[in-house]
Amino acid sequence: MLLFCLVGCIVPREEPKTNDVSVAYLWSLAQNRSTPIKEDIVLHGYISANDILGEYTKSFILSDSSGGIEVKVDATNIERILPWGCAISLHCSGLYIGREGGRLVLGTKPTDVYSVDRIPEDEIFNYVTIIDGEIEPLRADLMDITDIGYDDMFRYVMLQNIAIIEEERGLCWCDIDEVSGERITTIRHLTDGSDTIALITSPSALYSSERVAGYRARCIGVVDIYKEMVALRLSNYQITPME
C-alpha cells in the first residue's frame, strides 16, 4: 500500500512562501543608487496618489503604515487600471529600488541615466494584484507641519486648520512662464500660523489654472521633495474648508 501511494499518488508541490514586508523595509535595502530586489517579498498598501487629476504622471504612490514609495509605470492613464485609493499587493522580486536624491522609487532594471526604468504597462499586473473584498479604506496620517521631515518621504498625510500664506492668496496654483506662456511647476506655501511647508503643484494637474484656496482648510496629500526641500503634493485635490 505504501509503495502504491509513493508511485501512484500525486503529491502537491509546495508553493514557495513569500515574505510580506513594509515600505520601510525597502528603504533599508536601498544602499546604492540602484539596487536589484532578489528576495521574494510582497508589499501591501494603498494607491495614495496617481494621475487621477494629473498630480503625478507615469507613476503612482504606494503607501502603508510605515511610509510610501513611488512606483514608475510606462502608462499615461494609470487611474484606469489602478484606481486611486485601491488596495494592492506588489510583488517586488525582479524589480529595482532606485534612490533619486531623498526619494525612493521602484521600477525595472535601469538602461539609461535613471536609477530605474518604468514598468511597461502590459507587465504591471505581473507585479501588482488588486485586493478585492471588504478592507479598511485609505486613511491619511494626521500630522503637524513641524513634524514632517525627510523621513516621511511619500507618506500620505493630513494637515488641519492650515491656509495658503496671505501674499499668495488669489494666485493660481501654477504660474505661467514668461517666455513659453505655459504653466510651470510652482511652489505655494501652507501655514498653520506658526510653521510653513511648501506645496508643489505640477502643470499637469487639472486644477493648475485655478485660484488657490483662500480659506482655512483640511489638506491631504503626499510628502515629497522638490529642489532638496521637503514639501507636500496634493492627492486627488483634497483641500476642503474646515467646518
Image (cartoon, rainbow, N blue to C red):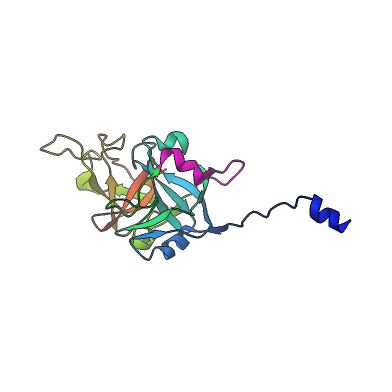
Residue 80, horizontal then vertical, whole percent: 44, 33
Left or right of 111, for residue 82: right
Whole-percent x and y of residue 167? 19, 47
Which quadrant is the C terminus positioned in? Answer: top left
Front residue of this view, candidates 227 and 37:
37
Query: Which quarter of the rendered picture does the N terminus lie within?
Result: bottom right
Say if the magenta span includes residue 137: yes
Residue with the most extreme right position: 1
Q: Determine the residue positioned at 43% across, 65% down.
A: 28
Q: Is residue 174 above or below residue 11?
A: above
Please state if 167 lies on the left or on the right of 63 as rendered. Answer: left
Q: Position of residue 21 (x, y in %)?
A: 52, 59
Q: Residue at x 23, y 44 (%)?
A: 185
> 38 above or below 73?
below
Magenta stretch bounds: 120-138
User: Which residue occupies the foreground of this view, 217 or 10?
Assistant: 10
Q: Position of residue 37 (x, y in %)?
A: 45, 58
Residue 134 is inside the magenta segment:
yes
- State whether residue 180 appears in this view: yes
